[in-house]
Image (spheres, coloured by chain):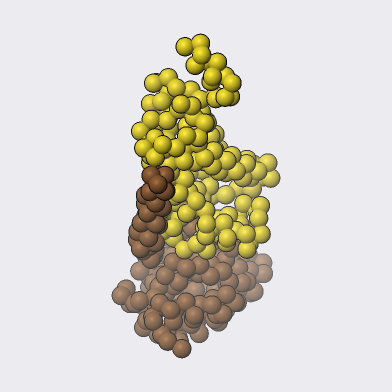
């Protein structure tokens, strides 16, 4: 036992492996995955110019960058969402989702700072219209969930079937 | 190898979902009271305009819009939606009047009168009185008109359009939606509108 602890310490592993945490991590994965897939689908179900217009309303990037982001972001959301649901490249996927929600939160907070009023956050295209101030809290919650997935050793994941180890622990 | 198959499964799910999402795109169903709709319900093309009677750009867009409607005739249905901007103090008054004139079947005559004489009534000493004068010139039932102005349904109709416009990220007038695709201003409508309509109708160059 002491030998195992010493081995863990020396390898710098920081994963959490309690069964309760592992179940929590699965629930977090499912929740984030569904949110990201819903966001991706709702954006893809409308012309990309509509989503580009929403990105432009944030006044953070040029129109051409907004159009590029509007083209790729829904696919990125889908990819991360499915990776989390399936448990594929989990550590990377949870890191990516965390970064994504940090970027979204930064954009939403910048609206507040600059006094820009938008009718909705535009996170779900034309299908669902949450207010920016609500989404600031939701995104923060999703960042915390991403961190849980990042830290906790996975169960019920494609990674385990594929024998992938990403420093989640043994 | 298993790792590769795992990636392939995720990619297949992403591609299938994206394909289905794109396939599920439906043209937005535009609604409005019948007096604000021109053209057949089964026309393949629907143009919806979010407009403001006091806005000069909306007046300027009237020419290109009418040309487009004449060009495509029965293939196009046109819907007018109220989007009075807060910066225009009399736009809402004009919108209320137009609704109540519309109730009596003269929406389009009044719509044309307001745009053709925009400079006069906007710069009149009392714009509401100038608007009233146009209403009177149409020979309507005055009692019904006055009752309509006070009817909460009239305000609800206008507010519903404003709410819908905000939900669809309209922040400038005129904004047109041709089968759901956005065109801002008369210039964009006349330059790019026909290309999009031809694409919808399957017209080959």
Residue located at (53% from left, 34% from top): A143
How many numbered callouts? 0
Image coordinates of residue B180 in percent, x first then y, are 44, 66
Q: Nearer the viewer, residue A30 or B94?
A: A30
For residue B108, above or below residue A67: below
What shade has chain A been given? yellow
For residue A81, above or below residue B120: above
Q: Nearer the viewer, residue A9 or B180?
A: A9
Q: Quadrant of residue A104?
A: top right
Q: Quadrant of residue A133?
A: top right
Image coordinates of residue B156 in percent, x first then y, are 42, 54
Image coordinates of residue A49 in percent, x first then y, are 52, 63
Residue located at (60% from left, 43% from top): A103
Residue located at (60% from left, 68% from top): B55
Image coordinates of residue B96 in percent, x first then y, are 48, 62
Q: Nearer the viewer, residue A117 or A21?
A: A21
Residue lying at the far right in this picture: please name it.
A114
Q: Is residue B184 left or right of residue A110?
A: left
Q: Quadrant of residue B173?
A: bottom right
Q: Nearer the viewer, residue B9 or B54?
A: B9
For residue B43, above or below residue A90: below
For residue B94, above or below residue B189: above
Work out whether residue A100 can be spotted: yes
Work out whether residue B140 can be spotted: no
Q: Which chain is brown?
A: B
Q: Is residue A25 left or right of residue B173?
A: left
């Amino acid at each position: 036992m002491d030998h195992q602890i010493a081995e863990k310490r020396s390898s710098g592993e920081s994963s959490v492996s309690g069964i309760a945490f592992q179940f929590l991590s699965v629930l977090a994965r499912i929740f984030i995955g569904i949110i990201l897939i819903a966001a991706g689908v709702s954006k893809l179900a409308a012309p990309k110019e509509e989503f580009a217009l929403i990105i432009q309303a944030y006044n953070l990037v040029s129109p051409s960058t907004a159009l590029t982001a509007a083209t790729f972001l829904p696919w990125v959301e889908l990819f991360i969402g499915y990776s989390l649901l399936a448990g594929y490249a989990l550590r990377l996927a949870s890191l990516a989702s965390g970064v994504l929600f940090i970027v979204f939160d930064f954009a939403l907070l910048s609206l507040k700072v600059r006094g820009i009023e938008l009718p909705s956050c535009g996170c779900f295209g034309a299908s669902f219209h949450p207010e920016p101030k609500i989404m600031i809290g939701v995104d923060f919650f999703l960042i915390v969930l991403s961190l849980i997935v990042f830290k906790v050793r996975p169960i019920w994941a494609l990674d385990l079937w594929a024998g992938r180890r990403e420093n989640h622990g043994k | 190898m298993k790792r590769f198959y795992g990636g392939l499964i995720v990619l297949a799910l992403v591609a299938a979902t994206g394909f289905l999402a794109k396939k599920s795109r439906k043209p937005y169903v535009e609604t409005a009271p019948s007096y604000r709709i021109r053209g057949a319900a089964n026309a393949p093309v629907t143009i919806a305009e979010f407009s403001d009677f006091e806005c000069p750009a909306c007046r300027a867009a009237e020419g290109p819009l009418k040309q487009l409607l004449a060009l495509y005739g029965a293939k196009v249905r046109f819907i007018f939606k109220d989007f009075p901007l807060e910066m225009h103090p009399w736009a809402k008054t004009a919108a209320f009047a137009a609704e109540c004139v519309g109730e009596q079947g003269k929406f389009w005559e009044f719509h044309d009168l307001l745009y053709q004489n925009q400079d006069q009534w906007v710069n009149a000493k009392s714009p509401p009185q100038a608007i009233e004068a146009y209403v009177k010139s149409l020979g309507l039932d005055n009692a019904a008109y006055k009752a309509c102005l006070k009817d909460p349904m009239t305000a609800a109709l206008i507010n519903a359009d404003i709410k819908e416009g905000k939900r669809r990220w309209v922040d400038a007038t005129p904004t047109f939606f041709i089968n759901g695709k956005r065109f801002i201003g008369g210039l964009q409508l006349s330059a790019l509108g026909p290309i999009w309509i031809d694409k919808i109708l399957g017209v080959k160059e």
